[in-house]
Structures are given as C-alpha cells and as structure tokens.
Amino acid sequence: PARDGPASEAALQLLCRADAGPLCAACRMAAGPEPPEWEPRWRKALRGKENKGSVEIMRKDLNDARDLHGQAESAAAVWKGHVMDRRKKALTDYKKLRAFFVEEEEHFLQEAEKEEGLPEDELADPTERFRSLLQAVSELEKKHRNLGLSMLLQ
C-alpha cells in the first residue's frame, strides 16, 4: 500500500468486493497477499464516479452510529435510574413490612400470655401450648394476609 501513496490506518482497511463489508487487519494478514475479492478502502474510494461520495457516506454512517449509541446510553441510564428507584422503594416497603410483623408478633405474644395466664402455662402440656401458639400464629396470618400486598402495591 505504500506504493499507492500515503494513507492512514483507517484508509488501509480492506473491503470485501462481494458484500463491501470491512475486514480487519488481522484477517488481511492471516490471508497473506491480497486475494482478488479484497481491495483497500482508499482505492475503492478513488475508483470512480459512483464511489466519490463513499467517504462522506461512511462519515455520515459513523456519525449516525455515534448518535444512536449516545441515545442508547441515555436510555440505559434513565432505565437504570428507574430500576434503582423501584429497588429502593421495594427495600423500604420490605423493611416497613418486616417491622410491622415483628411488632404484631410481640403484641400477639403479649396477648397470648395474658389470655393463658402464668399458672396455666406452667401446668399445661408443652405439646398443647405449642398447638395453641400455632393456632394463634395462623389466626394472625389470616388477619394480616392482605396487608403485605397492599403495602407493596402502594
């Protein structure tokens, strides 16, 4: 290519004559001497009337690609912001819900102790006490089943 005149590295890229797609320097070197279906991009640009505007077309295509890339990056940043906002809201709602259930559990256990009374607890069979607690937990879950969903949907 030096015998054809000075050219930049970009100008030395090869194009396939079949589909006019660019070929990288590694492919060109791996193939050895230039096969007839390849030709330097700068030579193609100089070849005739139909190719006089090819450099301008390539420049326009490059600028269009850069614009699209910038738009895609902007859209990705916006969506990332939306996702992070939703994540923060979900985490906050989860913490609120967890705190609510801890508070309700404490309240329920206090009520259960009042209802059962201390002397009865000491005399009661541990299996029966366990069943009673399971039943109380089940009632609490039924009572507040939809509360979690309503908090998450807000």
Image: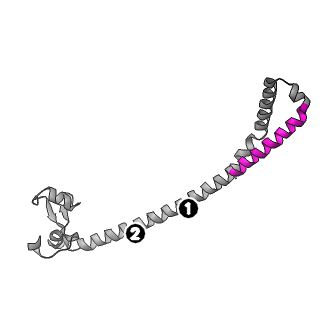
Q: Quadrant of the N terminus?
A: bottom left
Give the quarter of the image for residue 39: bottom left
Q: On the image, numbered disc 1 is attached to which residue?
A: 81
In this image, 132 relative to 94: left or right? right
Say which mark, if any, is on residue 122.
Answer: none
Which is nearer the N-term, disc 1 or disc 2?
A: 2
Q: Main secondary structure of the magenta part?
A: helix
As helix, strand or loop, the secondary structure at mark 2 comes to helix
Amino acid under label 2? Asp
Q: On the image, numbered disc 2 is attached to which residue?
A: 67
Whole-number angstrom distance, CA of label 1 to CA of label 2? 21 Å
As helix, strand or loop, the secondary structure at mark 1 comes to helix
Against 85, is 150 above or below? above
Against 131, is 72 above or below? below
Give the quarter of the image for residue 47: bottom left
Numbered range of the magenta stretch: 95-118
In the foreground, 38 or 107: 107
Residue 45 place in picture, x, y as percent: 18, 71
Residue 35 place in picture, x, y as percent: 10, 58
Is residue 112 highlighted in magenta? Answer: yes
Is residue 57 highlighted in magenta? Answer: no
